[in-house]
Image (spheres, helix red, strand yellow):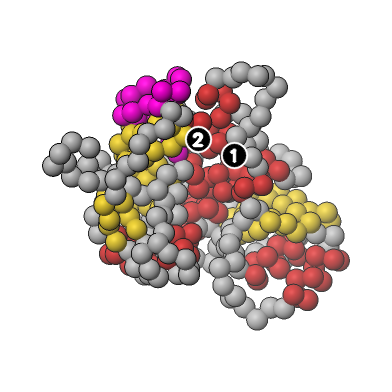
Amino acid sequence: MRSGATLPTEILFPAKQTFTLATYTDALLQPDEIRGRTLCTLISQGTEIGWANGETFPIRPGYAAVFEVTAVGAAVRGITPGMLRFAMGAHRATQTHLAQHTLPLPPGLDPQMAVVARLMGVSMSTLMTTQARPGDAVVITGAGPVGLLAAHLFRIGGYRVTLVDPDPLRRAQAGHSGLTDCRAAMPLEDPALRGQVALVVDCSGHEAAVREGCQMVRPRGEVVLVGVPWRKLTDLSAHDLLGPVFFNLVTLRSGWEWELPVQGRCFQWETLLDGYNNAPHSILGGFARAMDWLAEGRIPLAGLVHVARPEDPAQLYADIMARRIAAPFIVLDWTAQG
């Protein structure tokens, strides 16, 4: 860095529920890395507040970033300065990543929309691994950011999707985005659905929703736990869940997104970087597919993205915890930094 230059900044959680903006110095760029100026990053509200209430600090949060490449390691091929790249990056003014862990943006895709692909990836793993097939009925419980996107993913995949959330604002946002079957409660009394559902994707982390999901699915149906059960929300016992699982022949499993490899594998010894990362049935392949669908306008996000500045993280995260930001997606604009 040149003499007198201002150090770049990043959001830091130095202690529980403590949110600061700190300076840092970039390390020497390695031969297989690329570096660039951050354009925007995505906040994962539930995950980052969970981290802030944890026990291990300091934490450098962040979920996804789009950056403009400014420097390329000597061993990197096919990436040049000026390109826009997507990565699982932290909330900081610059990004440095292994080149193979980044993806190009589809032509014309707004960076502030592209970062939403990271949240789409949370349920993309379930879409890639489920036994349910297009045309089957799927119920998504929880219409927060992950659940809303999960509903769209399965709709795009050809499934008949029902989205359940008791919050009228979330249901209204889902309807505004084009989802037509949004309900306040699990449709346990609907004979067209109960016992006919192939898959319930729980994005709420609520144990009552999981039990109801096990009551909804058809025999051998799946209930997949995508939402993190951060805390106990009811007095339900394990027995309350085991009965529906056993008698309904339910396949109950984790929806942990990392069951897939980060990169796809192919049968060629040599492959172009982006072709390798775009391989199906991988984490990066899912992100690439998600960005393509965003670029095609298949998930309407108008009015659902709140753009904030990173300069006052304490106020920003206080607003998130107090639910003062109505939009489900929060993007940080870093273009004025550095």
Disc 1: CA contacts within 10 A as few (<14), some (14-19) or many (>=20): some
* Residue 31 highlighted magenta (yes or no): no
Residue 202 spot, x, y in % from top left: 63, 59
Among the 4 quarters of the image, the one containing residue 276 = top right
| Depth order, front residue of 280/10 | 10
Residue 145 spot, x, y in % from top left: 48, 54
Q: Residue at x 55, y 36 (%)?
A: 284
Identify whether 146 is placed above or below 246. above
Tell me the tag on residue 101: 2
| Depth order, front residue of 27/86 | 27
> Can residue 251 be spotted in the picture?
yes
Among the 4 quarters of the image, the one containing residue 83 = top left
Among the 4 quarters of the image, the one containing residue 61 = bottom left
* Residue 72 highlighted magenta (yes or no): yes
Tell me the tag on residue 33: none
Residue 335 spot, x, y in % from top left: 25, 41
Q: What residue type is labelled 2?
A: His
Q: Give the range drawn in magenta.
A: 69-87
Q: Is residue 312 left or right of residue 148?
A: left
Residue 135 spot, x, y in % from top left: 72, 41
Q: Dividing the image into 4 quarters, which one contains the N terminus?
A: top left
Q: What element carries label 2?
A: helix
Q: What element carries label 1?
A: loop
Q: Which amino acid does label 1 sit on?
A: Val
> Can residue 300 be spotted in the picture?
no
Q: Is residue 127 left or right of residue 3?
A: right
The reply to whether callout 2 and callout 1 are in contact (CB within 8 Å) is yes
Identify whether 131 is placed above or below 321. above
Residue position for label 1: 262
Outermost residue toward the left in this view: 4
Separation (CA) of disc 2 from disc 1: 8 Å
